[in-house]
Image (cartoon, grey):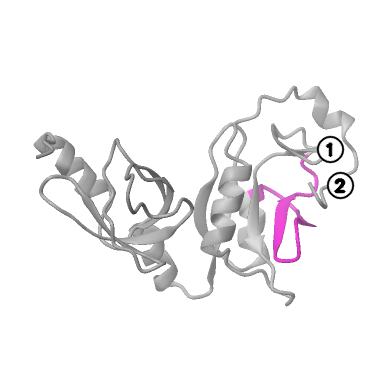
Amino acid sequence: MRKVNQDKIKEIKQKYPKGTRIMLNSMDDPHHPVPSGTLGTVETVDDIGTIHMKWDNGQSLGLIVGEDSFYVIESVQNQEKIREADEKIRVLVVEPMKEPKVEYIENTLDDMQKVVGGLIEEIDLDNNTVLVCNEEGKLMNLQANRRVGRDVIAGTFFIAGDDGSEDLVSLTDEQVNEYKERFHELEEIEQQEVFEKIEITIRGF
């Protein structure tokens, strides 16, 4: 039987409470593994540290920390936040030299401006998502953040859903995963490059 330190088991239970949403990268099971990229919800963590899952595809194979590769795409705390305020939307915030993180913000101009630190500019990424950044980020000499297409975004930006209506909408699980992967790498960009990029052209990047 697999032995796990009791302190480690306690840590696993605290880190992955019931309701946590998880994305699977790969599973160390030669027979009937859950396919890579599958989304699921934590049911419980047992006394030997196995994370029992309810996968969206109907499978129920558990996860073993240190053997299977996976990551949290939505914590229980964030789920509680969205239930507390239906007017909030789920977005992916990308700060310079930090990994992307899921946050819930008011679907208002004021809250969006607070996230990016000034006037907002919306840039279409595809038919269903937009990148929202500081319109004056380059003029304000905000820190270089990420390259997008042939341009550099200055300052914090966030990704939100776009359903064709006037308001932005929450990202889906799949969109969160896609853009977490897209902006996962921390890019060290010379600040001078911000001034060399005037036009933002990111369609089809």
For image coordinates 10% across by 38% down, the residue present is 6
Q: Secondary structure at mark 2?
A: loop
x then y, percent, for residue 35? 44, 54
Q: Identity of the amino acid at label 1?
A: Arg
Q: Quadrant of the N terminus?
A: top left
Q: Is residue 76 left or right of residue 131?
A: left
- Residue marked by disc 2: 201
- Towards the viewer: 48 or 74: 48
Instruction: Mark 2: give few (<14), some (14-19) or many (20+) Cα within 10 Å.
Output: some
Residue 29 vertical position relative to residue 170 in the rendered view, above or below: above
Q: CA distance from mark 1 to mark 2?
A: 7 Å
Q: Magenta residues, as a range?
A: 116-137
Q: Secondary structure at mark 1?
A: loop
| Res 148 → quadrant | top right
Q: Which mark is residue 112?
A: none
Q: Is residue 42 left or right of residue 155?
A: left
For image coordinates 16% across by 42% down, the residue present is 9
For image coordinates 30% across by 37% down, the residue present is 67
x then y, percent, for residue 145? 68, 35
The magenta stretch spans residue 9: no
Q: Which mark is residue 150?
A: 1
Residue 7 vertical position relative to residue 51 in the rendered view, above or below: above
Q: Is residue 139 visible?
A: no
The magenta stretch spans residue 118: yes
Residues at marks 1 and 2 touching, judged by CB atoms closer than 8 Å: yes
Q: Identity of the amino acid at label 2?
A: Thr
Instruction: Mark 1: give few (<14), some (14-19) or many (20+) Cα within 10 Å.
Output: few
Q: Which of marks 2 and 1 precedes in the sequence?
A: 1
